[in-house]
Image: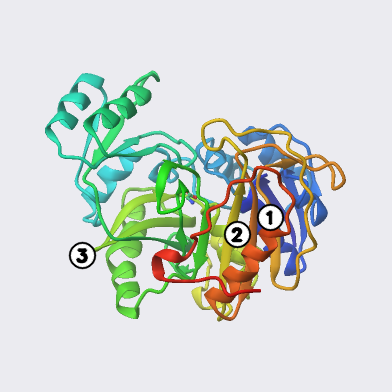
Amino acid sequence: MRVLVIGGGGREHAIVHACARAGHEVLCTPGNPGIAQIARIIPSAQDAASLARLAQQESADVVIVGPEAYLAAGVVDECAVLGIPAFGPTRAASRLEGDKAWSKAFMHRHGIPTAAHHTFSRMDDARTHVQRLTPPIVVKDAGLKAGKGVTIAHTTQDAEAALLDIFTQDGAQAVIEDFMTGHEVTVLALTDGERYALTPPSQDHKTINEGDTGPMTGGMGVICPFPLSDEQLSTIRQTIIEPTLRGMRADGHPFQGVLYAGLMLTPNGPKVVEFNARFGDPEAEAVLPLLDSDLAQHALDAARGTLNPTDVQFRTAASATIILAAPGYPAEPQKGIPLSLPEPGPDEVIYHAGTTGSHAGLVSSGGRVLAITAVASTLNAALGRAYALAERTDFPGAQLRRDIGARIGAVPDPV
Ligand code: GLY
């Protein structure tokens, strides 16, 4: 097949890598220097209509959309107009991620377990509400914020500061939620809107500093699989994934693509922290290397409404992804830092997340710069190899967390 992947970060590198290793011809826009080594990069205007036309001009058999912003802009809808199968939800269905106030109301309507919440359109009302609460207080920007729109405020003042930040934008809404405790886990469902296959569960590490402290980031490292019992998985299927897909169909917005359920394993069972409408980043960089079947074929089947969940197969192995982030990230990432990458070994990949330039003149161009992944028979072995590869990467001033996997007691094997 000829596959067009839209996006240019670490997640899209992982998608391109999965399609290329299944033998497909892969095109990508806008791409990045790592993707350029395994796919044809096509410069293009990035609006939804131009991207759909590009897919048509290039005779793409299927389009796979990486980032949420393209979904919210309606790229899947535009592809549908031209009769091109595209893997991802329509603009209307992507509201599950793009509008947190709508998403919470959806969960409430369909009885999907999640934290109690209130939505506010006025700063004064939101401030009065937080003044009545006992911290920690969860404050979310209702709009798309690339994973950084959530503040866990440990004081009322911090909650008010987060609200001030949100209400500087016209038409902003803030969602204020109860704080939940437990392990956070990501469950991804590949779905055609009705049938679905779960990927192995994974766990991201969202704050910049070790010990889960400091500001939120897009994600600093992932382990996969996160150990869930059969009973927990069955509860997640029955109380979260299936009612969500049913609810989206009932509401007239069938959800096709990747349903990302960010869950908290609370003492009262799994509850939704957030839904996203696409592969996680960096979850994709840890989950997709374990995929044993053909991502492009699953994407095409899902887009056509004919996904067979038993076709979706994963290796029995573990993976670990370590993010190397730029100095100054997440507030003000320093750009233009020269990078020199080692040659990865078997079952190791360095995904480019925020790089630019050629192989010889590669420099950082974003906050999260590289996603370093290793796959091995055990999680400790995968962590050991990923950290060893990170050590061999020349990236002056890089920030990384050395405690990926520590929450569940994983310890990197010496390499
Ligand atoms: N890793 C969090 C996200 O993709 O939103």
Give the percent coordinates (x, y) of residue 66: 59, 49
- Which residue is at the far left? 132
Disc 3 target residue: 267
Could you tell me which secondary element the residue under label 2 belongs to? helix
Amino acid type indicated by mark 1 = Tyr
Q: Identify the secondary structure beneath mark 1.
A: strand
Residue identifier under label 2: 285
Residue 112 x, y percent position in the rendering: 25, 56
What is the C-alpha distance between the residues marked 3 and 1?
36 Å
Q: Is residue 98 above or below residue 243?
A: above
The tag earlier along the polypeptide, 3 or 1, is 3
Q: Amino acid at mark 3?
A: Pro
Q: Is residue 5 left or right of residue 27?
A: left
* Mark 3 residue element: loop
**Pointer 3 or 2: first along the chain:** 3
Q: Residue at x 64, y 38 (%)?
A: 366
Looking at the image, which is closer to me, 176 or 303? 176
Q: Are marks 2 and 1 in contact (CB under 8 Å)?
A: yes
Beta carbon of the mark 2 residue lies under 8 A of ligand 1: no
Asked whether, in this view, residue 332 is left or right of residue 159, the answer is right
**Residue at x-position 78% and y-position 54%:** 341
**Percent x, y for residue 90?**
49, 45
Crowd around label 2: few <14 · some 14–19 · many ≥20 (10 Å) = many
